[in-house]
Image: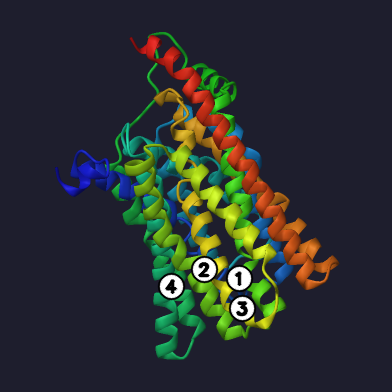
Amino acid sequence: MNLLAKVGFDTNKQFYGFLSVVMSGQIIYSAFEAFKGTFYNLLLEVLKIDNTQMGILFTLIGSAMFFYIPAGWVNNRFSVKSILITSLLVRFVSMMTIITLQPDFTVLIVIAAIWGITDAIFWPAVVNGVNLMSGDHNKGMAFGLLESIRRATEMSMNAIIVGIMALVGGSILVFQGAIVFYTLLILPMVFCVWKFVPDNSLEVKQGESKNKAALQGLIHVLKMPTVWLAAITSLTVYWTYITLIYTVPYLQAVFDLSTAQAAVFGIINTGAMGVVAGLVAGSISDFIFKSSTKMMLFALGLTVVCLGVTIALPKSADMLIMNMILLMCFSFSIFLAKGIILAPVAEAGVPKEFSGAAMSVGSFAAYASVFWAYALNGWIIDTYPAVQAYQMIFGIGLTVSAFGMVCAFGLLALKKKQAPQLATQGS
């Protein structure tokens, strides 16, 4: 048995198709969204907008949340291949419009709104493609690879820009050139999707409407308790992951960590850790627990322990190293869960032809916390003294993770209860 077979891929073409789906899910964001952390100020300069306007653009892109459920119908009705290709081309045309015409903010608003709607359809197609291309087994490994490959690609592509800027003096022309080059990468990505990703068009009986069948599939998925339990578990994972972002400002505010020290810690804790944890989570999920839900339950349990001890530890200067170690353990544990965030949805017993709708519902729930978690945490930091504020934020993360454990345990119990019935139906 070769290495590809061990991780769930029967043929080289299946593996290439999987990579095409995963990379399309990163390349589409590489010339804009992937810059917001490392090159935020340069992005403002290139677009000639201010911070408030940038916030409006990202809010419009985030409006994808409101379209995830209706996008479930689209993901049932149309194939993964057609959705990926169409979405990539929409992004290519709109990015080239920004590059060549340098439009004013009004046009950027329209483009951002288009991206929000497109993303609501595109991202469920990516995770559905990962689900379909990974076959009937090794879902944890497939979703772990999705997380690790995307994070490693983003870090590498941004690092290349930083390296070139360091050599030539940080010219904005380098950044503009990177935007153009990364946008052009969409075209070979379209070719790879066309060549390697199979067509999984919805099959219906003669005389039956595909539109109606897709809608019935969406309704069927919305009625499945296993899907919602898996989706809510994913929500708790992402909500707690947002808490991770505040570990760096916590160390700065409470322990007076320098900017340079905080930057190094941030790169490791919120970047490199995700690359490693995705692969580890997939391996443990498939080869030890044999279930992504059990892996999720285990990872959330580790998160509860790490946050609990962090909250309990003294905040004196001599405890800095211990706090950093615990926060790195917290990072690793939540990345273990995030690496397979939608794998439980893939294992929720959804008919294969309706898996697109399941991934839309899962995406809707998983990322819903962006609409309140950042605002809530920001309000807490602005309202309370530093130590108390971060204790509260970590306490919320601990509570949410514990609730996620309850949901994961409930999902396992429900699947166990349904197993005899499903076995009877299968026979």
Residue at the (47%, 14%) spot, across then down = 209
- What amino acid is at disc 3? Leu
Residue corresponding to mark 4: 178
Residue 269, label in figure: 2
Q: Residue 194 appears in which quarter of the rendering?
A: top left
**Element assignment for label 3:** helix
Q: Compared to 161, does 193 lie above or below? A: above
Q: Compared to 422, does 115 lie above or below? A: below
The front one of 417 and 364 is 417
Residue at the (71%, 65%) spot, across then down = 53
> How far apart, in angstroms, are the residues tagged by discs 2 and 4?
26 Å
Residue 47, label in figure: 1
Residue at the (43%, 64%) spot, across then down = 154
The front one of 325 and 340 is 325
Q: Which mark sits nearer the N-terminus, 2 or 4?
A: 4
| Left or right of residue 149: residue 254 | right
The front one of 160 and 309 is 309
Q: Are marks 3 and 2 in contact (CB under 8 Å)?
A: no
Q: Residue 66 appears in which quarter of the rendering?
A: top right
Q: Which mark sits nearer the N-terminus, 3 or 4?
A: 4
> How far apart, in angstroms, are the residues tagged by discs 1 and 4?
14 Å
Q: Which mark sits nearer the N-terminus, 1 or 3?
A: 1
- What amino acid is at disc 4? Ala
Q: Compared to 36, does 207 lie above or below? A: above
- Total numbered labels: 4
Q: Compared to 158, does 284 lie above or below? A: above
Q: Are marks 1 and 4 in contact (CB under 8 Å)?
A: no
| Left or right of residue 57: residue 129 | left
Foreground tag (1 vs 4) = 4
Residue 320, label in figure: 3
